[in-house]
């Protein structure tokens, strides 16, 4: 029998069978993930082959090869990693310009990480119902910055059904990761897409303007339109281990486009002469904030996606 892991807490998990049933399942034997020293062999989104034991639980005999996966460090100081989710078609980052305000550096770190994993990324800008004239202007700027870099943006209000129609269509029949700081409205959006899911939402505390975490494990929800959303509460320490400083500019699509056009082959686009990227920045073809965040990430001690 085949199925998909929709929730995983280590070696035990919940599997959605291809016939629509959900069962609890455990691993039969020991599995290791090639090349990753991970604390969990099973991740949400894994396609598995299993048998049903006498008590009705599943025994997983096979984990299909992953198309992709994202990992985070198991703990802050650990070298081991935790596989958060696998087989993702698109990663959505939900941000808000107010209540709470998402920093552009956070957005750029997320995008850099998605690029490193070769997972297409899009940005959902929520709570537009709260934006005054000043924030509306900022919204237009943010959209311009990211769309010209190649990331589709969706300004929405999760409270307004009409504004989410376009997203709903995109989610159909695909596996979509939903990330973002707590309190930005992820649960509200998922509930609006499919009210049957009834996910607990997070009141934003009026004091900090940020939400409290309610859950910690990633969970995959099946929408009535056949799509899947992987909810990743508290996904902050996305980690990529294989990223070198020298490769960082390849993770910015608008810079990647200009690769090979700098005078020096090993140009890091900081102060080198005849740098195609510095020229494009000067000409306004690369957004100033994106370039500033390129430098910030470049100069941080370690390039680790976002924290
Ligand atoms: P999560 O932590 O990202 O899952 O955020 P929640 O979905 O729990 O939402 C946090 C708070 O923001 C809740 O009080 C929601 O009602 C509120 N909220 C979510 N989306 C919107 C929106 O589009 N507009 C407004 N005004 N409030 C929203
Ligand atoms: Zn250069």
Image (spheres, rainbow, N blue to C red):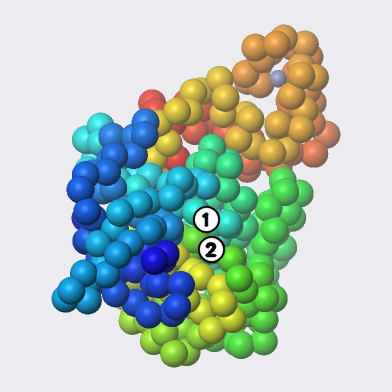
**Above-or-below relation of 262 to 155:** above
Q: Residue at image x 30%, y 54%?
A: 61
C-alpha gap between disc 1 and disc 2: 6 Å
| 171 with respect to 238 (left or right) | right
Q: Residue at image x 59%, y 66%?
A: 174
- Dot 2: element: strand
**Above-or-below relation of 101 to 190:** above
| 279 with respect to 101 (left or right) | right
Q: Badge 1 is on which residue? A: 88
Q: Dot 2: few (<14), some (14–19), or many (≥20) neighbours within 10 Å?
A: many
| 157 with respect to 51 (left or right) | right
Q: Position of residue 94 (x, y in %)?
A: 52, 64
- Judged from this view, the residue extending furthest toward the left is 55
Q: Is residue 304 visible?
A: no
Q: Position of residue 208 (x, y in %)?
A: 33, 68
Displayed-image quarter of ligand 2: top right
Q: Position of residue 66 (x, y in %)?
A: 47, 47
Q: Residue at image x 45%, y 28%?
A: 242
Q: The C terminus is located in which quarter?
A: top left
Between 259 and 136, which is closer to the camera in this rendering?
259
Q: Position of residue 45 (x, y in %)?
A: 43, 59
| Quarter occupied by residue 114 | top right
Q: Residue at image x 49%, y 61%?
A: 177
Between 242 and 31, which is closer to the camera in this rendering?
31
Q: The N terminus is located in which quarter?
A: bottom left
Q: Which mark is residue 176?
A: 2
Q: Which mark is residue 265?
A: none
Asked if disc 1 and disc 2 are in contact, CB closer than 8 Å, the reply is yes
| Quarter occupied by residue 156 | bottom right
- Dot 1: element: loop
Q: Which mark is first along the chain, 2 or 1?
A: 1
| 302 with respect to 24 (left or right) | right
């Amino acid at each position: 029998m085949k199925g998909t892991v929709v929730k995983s807490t280590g070696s035990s998990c919940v599997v959605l069978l291809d016939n629509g049933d959900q069962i609890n399942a455990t691993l039969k034997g020991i599995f290791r993930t090639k090349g990753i020293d991970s604390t969990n062999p099973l991740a949400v989104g894994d396609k598995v082959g299993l048998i049903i034991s006498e008590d009705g639980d599943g025994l997983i005999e096979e984990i299909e090869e992953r198309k992709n996966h994202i990992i985070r460090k198991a703990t802050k100081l650990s070298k081991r990693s935790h596989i958060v989710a696998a087989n993702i078609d698109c990663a959505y980052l939900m941000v808000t310009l107010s209540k709470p305000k998402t920093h552009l550096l956070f957005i750029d770190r997320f995008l850099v990480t998605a690029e490193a994993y070769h997972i297409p990324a899009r940005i959902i800008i929520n709570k537009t119902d709260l934006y005054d004239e000043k924030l509306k202007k900022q919204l237009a700027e943010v959209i311009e910055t990211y769309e010209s870099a190649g990331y589709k943006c969706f300004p929405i209000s999760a409270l307004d059904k009409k504004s989410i129609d376009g997203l709903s269509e995109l989610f159909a029949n695909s596996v979509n990761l939903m990330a973002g700081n707590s309190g930005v409205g992820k649960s509200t959006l998922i509930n609006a897409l499919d009210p049957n899911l009834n996910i607990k939402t997070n009141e934003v505390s009026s004091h900090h303007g940020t939400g409290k975490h309610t859950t910690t494990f990633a969970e995959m929800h099946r929408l009535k339109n056949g799509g899947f959303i992987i909810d990743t509460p508290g996904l902050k320490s996305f980690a990529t281990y294989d990223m070198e400083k020298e490769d960082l500019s390849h993770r910015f699509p608008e810079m990647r486009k200009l690769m090979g056009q700098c005078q020096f082959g090993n140009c890091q686009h900081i102060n080198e002469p005849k740098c195609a990227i510095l020229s494009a920045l000067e000409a306004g073809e690369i957004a100033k904030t994106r370039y500033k965040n390129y430098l910030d990430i470049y100069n941080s001690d370690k390039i680790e996606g976002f924290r």
